[in-house]
Amino acid sequence: MTKQDIITALSERMHIERLRPMQTELLDTDASSVALAAPTGSGKTIAFTAYLLRRTGKPEGAVQGVVMVPSRELALQVRDVVRTLASGLKVVALYGGHSMDDEKKSLTPSPDIIVATPGRLLDHLQRKQLSLEAVKVVVLDEYDKCLELGFEDDMRRIRRFIPHLRDIVLTSATPMAEIPEWLGAGTPEVHDHSTSHAAAALQIVGIESPSRDKAAVLIDLLHAIHAGKTIVFVNHRESADRLCGILRKAGIDAALYHGGLDQHGRETAVAMLANGTAPVLVATDLASRGLDITGVDAVVHYHIPPTPESWTHRNGRTARNGADGTVYVITSEADSMPDFITISRPWTPPAHDEDAVVRGNMATLHFNAGRKEKVSRGDIAGFLIARGGLDPAEVGRIVVADHEAIAAVPRSKARAVIEAVAPYKLKNKKVRVTRMKL
């Protein structure tokens, strides 16, 4: 694609009229090796997508570009951005936990661009279900996270399947110490935007808990700030399970996110936060990177983050793209405040009314049909309006997967909508619509 094609696509399909310096740099560069350091929420996905598409031509019946990412969630998000901008090109995502049969079918005819986790991409290569012989450009997104998760060996092996690699981009939230020799990338052109983030003006609010068990203070806090989306970070899965249960018993709609959940459970939790069903997400550091959730108003450190990197990535969930956001740090006498945390101001949230609840204003409906059944977001929106009796403005976020879909509707109307659509077919198919629970 030409530079103008990409600029036009950004304007028409993503409503981006003005590029950030980092995005302009990667769109304009002629370097064959680029190291990009930029924090979460800074727009680096668009930056490396611009680089990738400038080096990707018309469909050639073979894979031309590969983006490797460390997580399933990031694979889906990057795929959506690339697919939106890559007019006329076939873009697919390959990741663990996804149907191997569905992925195999998606490789015929050959995609032009693949977004994949290293393990799943290597699996397809070893099964001889695709070829990377024609690949000229590779992006290793969140490269530092890939190393942290132990993907280096997989990436080394994948590199051997790409004999004609010409251009490469490595991205990281922090500057990279070195580029591995096995990539054969040469000396990279470095673009360090790791400190050019709006979070520099982020308010860090300190809250003291009189008890080592901070749940009571957290509940007061969530009642006090109940106005948008909040992510509460803990250090362990068991703590997340326990805390989420406490919040739900206290009348707070909270979703749960950690590595012990299956992919479907994690995706559902993120969707419920994003669409307004759950105003609170209780999560481990797995949620600190790779999730693209807009409009997170607050981050709460229920546990002190173990490292400066964890602190940075957790905070990067809010105040994204110039938006406002606040970080709350809850401490007790058992905590030792590390040097990398500086409190802007202390605060004590008022005690909440015992009868008060924190509820989402939306409900999530589940449809047992999806992309493979030829159901689109437009089909579901039209169905909810025509048969469910909703106004167009009442239809919330819709997410369509391979064999299912979810849609957000006003909480107060969820039951009526389900009853209203029950007698009708969606695209001449009988589809079961149910309300999803937290």
Image (cartoon, rainbow, N blue to C red):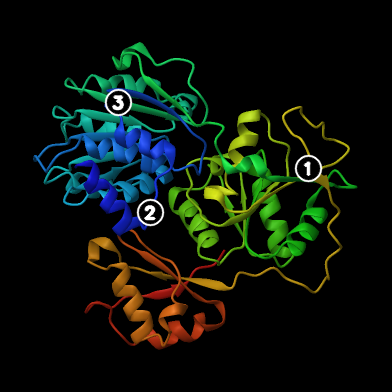
Secondary structure at numbered mark 3: strand
Q: Is residue 422 visible?
A: no
The mark closer to the camera, 1 or 3, is 1
Secondary structure at numbered mark 1: loop
Rate crowding at label 1 as few (under 14), some (14 to 19) or many (20 or more) other CA atoms within 10 Å. few
Residue 434 lies left or right of residue 339; in this view the side is: left
Q: Residue 142 appears at what percent x and percent y?
A: 44, 32
Structural distance between the alpha carbons of marks 3 and 2: 25 Å
* Residue beneath the point at 18% across and 29% down: 135
Q: Residue 96 appears at what percent x and percent y?
A: 36, 41
Looking at the image, is mark 1 or mark 2 earlier in the sequence?
A: 2
Which amino acid lies under the numbered mark 3 shown in the image of this protein? Ile
The residue tagged 3 is: 168
Q: Residue 109 appears at what percent x and percent y?
A: 11, 46
Q: Please tell me which residue lies in front, 271 or 349.
A: 349
Which amino acid lies under the numbered mark 2 shown in the image of this protein? Ile
The residue tagged 2 is: 16
Looking at the image, is mark 3 or mark 2 earlier in the sequence?
A: 2
Residue 212 lies left or right of residue 254; in this view the side is: right
Q: Specify the quadrant that holds the N terminus.
A: top left
Structural distance between the alpha carbons of marks 1 and 2: 33 Å
Q: Please tell me which residue lies in front, 34 or 354.
A: 34
The residue tagged 1 is: 344
The mark closer to the camera, 1 or 2, is 2
Q: Is residue 268 visible?
A: yes
Rate crowding at label 2 as few (under 14), some (14 to 19) or many (20 or more) other CA atoms within 10 Å. few
Q: Residue 297 appears at what percent x and percent y?
A: 63, 56
